[in-house]
Amino acid sequence: MKTKKEITSIIDTLKDLYPDAECSLDYQKDYELLFSVRLAAQCTDARVNLVTPALFARYPTLEDFARADVDEVGEYVHSTGFWRAKARDMVAAAQMLVNEYGGKVPDTMEDLLRLPGVGRKTANLILGDIYGKEGYVCDTHCIRITGRLGITDGSKDPVKVEMQLRQCIPPEESNNFCHRMVLHGRAVCMARSPQCSGCALANICTYGRSAQEND
């Protein structure tokens, strides 16, 4: 596991590499981000961004989503995969938001997890991106890279990784740190054939050091 000094160095290096740590999903309203994250399950953000303009134009308000026919919503999101479950969850979540939360996306982990289709990853993203709170978004990139770096113990369990990150990544850095994990995972630290030789974190990375020693 990394020392506090090493963690700080990793965070600072990532800030230099990716100064604009932003979510890659396009949205204008809080609930649109909630639905976009649901659509991104087992699908790329790029594909979701191609689908959502027509979807959000067809249902311009949360109330429209709450009244929507699930099958029709499914037609709009079909290409994202698992469309029946995604459409069902979005309509049900919209109904709950309208009926129980006054049309507002809740700002607590407990309430977010009550919404259909919302797990800890989605809830953490909403808390960080919408409300500026701590948000430890443990997607595949974050799980893979923090394990390789030696920040976490290599567990593939999102909840275990989240709890480990909460112990070492400062809350105020958490949301942007996780966004930078995604950016680094796409640009350098891919699942297959990571570019360790050109990685700015190689000298502080457990996996990167091993790769250099084996060259």
Image: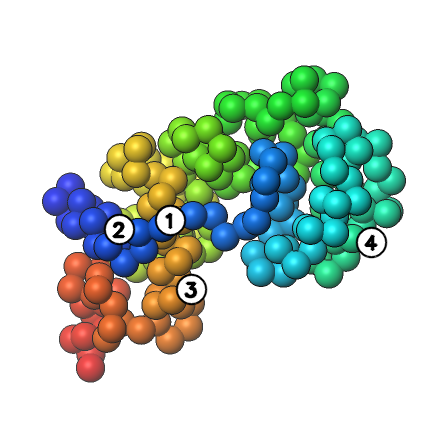
Say which label, 1 or 4, has the lower sequence index.
Answer: 1
Q: Is residue 19 left or right of residue 101?
A: left
Q: Which residue is mark 2?
A: 15
Q: Amino acid at mark 1?
A: Ala
Say which label, 3 or 1, has the lower sequence index.
Answer: 1
Residue density around tag 2, few if under 14, some if 14–19, many if 20 or more, within 10 Å: some
Secondary structure found at label 2: helix
Can residue 130 be seen in this snapshot? yes
Measured as percent of width and height from the top left, residue 112 is found at 57, 28
Report which quarter residue 173 is drawn in: top left
Residue at the limit of the structure toward the left, as seen here: 5
Residue at the limit of the structure toward the bottom, as seen here: 215
Measured as percent of width and height from the top left, residue 158 is found at 45, 45
Say which label, 2 or 1, has the lower sequence index.
Answer: 2
Q: Which residue is mark 3?
A: 186
From the viewer's side, name the closer residue of 213 and 15: 15
Secondary structure found at label 4: helix
Q: Amino acid at mark 4?
A: Glu
Distance from the alpha carbon under mark 1 to that under mark 4: 32 Å
Q: Which residue is mark 4?
A: 75
Distance from the alpha carbon under mark 2 to that under mark 4: 40 Å
Measured as percent of width and height from the top left, residue 153 is found at 30, 50
From the viewer's side, name the closer residue of 199 and 120: 199
Say which label, 3 or 4, has the lower sequence index.
Answer: 4
Secondary structure found at label 1: loop
Q: Residue at x 43, y 48 (%)?
A: 22
Q: Which mark is residue 21?
A: 1
Residue density around tag 4, few if under 14, some if 14–19, many if 20 or more, within 10 Å: few
Whether the residues at callouts 2 and 1 have beta carbons within 8 Å, the answer is: yes
